[in-house]
Amino acid sequence: MQVIFLAEKPCALKVNGAYFGMVDGFEKRAELDVKDGLFCEFLPTGYEAVRFRFDEEFLLAPPPHIDLYFVKSGVAVYCRDLVKSDPSLTVLWQEKTGGSLLTLCMQGSLQLNLENEKGFHIVRLPEELSDCKPYALGEEILLEGTIGFAVVSREGELLLCTEGKVTEKGETLKAEIPFADSMGHTAAIERKAGKLVSCSIRSRYEPTERTFALALFESVLIGADAAPFLAEDLKEKAGSLRQFLGKYVSVVLTDDPALTGLVYGRKPHVFDVRYFRVTLENGKIANIREE
């Protein structure tokens, strides 16, 4: 089986104790047999190692910090949500906001300790929010960072956590959230009284010939209008494309501009990648079929 190793941060990769190279967003490939039960290690600097045995049990239920993506050629093993190797507690700040005592601290990972009349709660946060500041947002709490923000309920539920920029805060939260896709889509959202009251999607770039199919599937995923990508015979079916394609969660570019991978969740931390080919006629998509 072909195995593709990737990681969210640079890691040294070892297989059965032998150094296999460095991995991060750039992959390392190997032919491994699950029957051999090879011992694999991701070794990031400053973070705890992630270790597992590559066998049939691993493919059925990967350990924490590993996501599996089953592709045509085999499986991609992605190491993520790494924990700092220094276990000591560092308090970043403590403030009282909206009737809750908030303590942001780092202890292996970033966490918000929230205490009020509803109890004591620990909210796990991405490391990128380590510079965030708290603000009362009606009955909710806004944690605004340099490159992203989160919204937490008084019961300790993480309601929203994303990259993006807050443009207005108070009783109403307004923000711009990037999708990091090929057309530079952003969502301008407005949230009030615990509910999303408006959302408009904007794009910054026009698709190129290389990204045309990719842009179609990304647009369907985020709920943007797919009709401009389709030939006249298909435009009336633009609204039913999501039902036809199913509940995919992300889109993968391939070496073939006409072939795009769609990622579907199988169970927690395990995903399947299905591939769809488009046919262009006069610069528009005239057919979509699964390969």
Image (cartoon, rainbow, N blue to C red):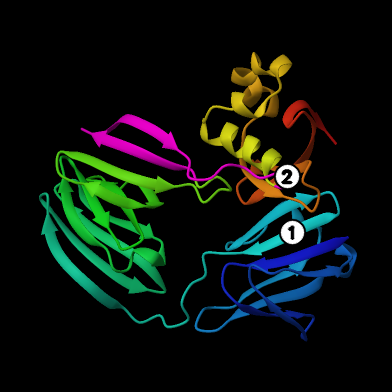
Mark 2 or 1, nearer chain start: 1
212 vs 89, nearest the viewer: 212
- The x, y position of residue 47, in whole percent, is 51, 79
Write the residue at 77% across / 46% down. 257
Q: Is 28 colored magenta in this rendering?
A: no
Write the residue at 58% across / 63% down. 65
The residue type indicated by label 2 comes to Asp
Q: Which mark is residue 272?
A: 2
Q: How many marks?
A: 2
Say which quarter of the image contains residue 108: bottom left
| Label 1 SS | strand
Say which quarter of the image contains residue 232: top right
Position of the C terminus, as image quadrant, is top right
- Residue 263 shows up from this direction: no
- Per the rendered image, the range of residues in magenta is 185-210
- The x, y position of residue 192, in whole percent, is 22, 33
Kindly identify which residue carries mark 1.
76
The residue type indicated by label 1 comes to Ala
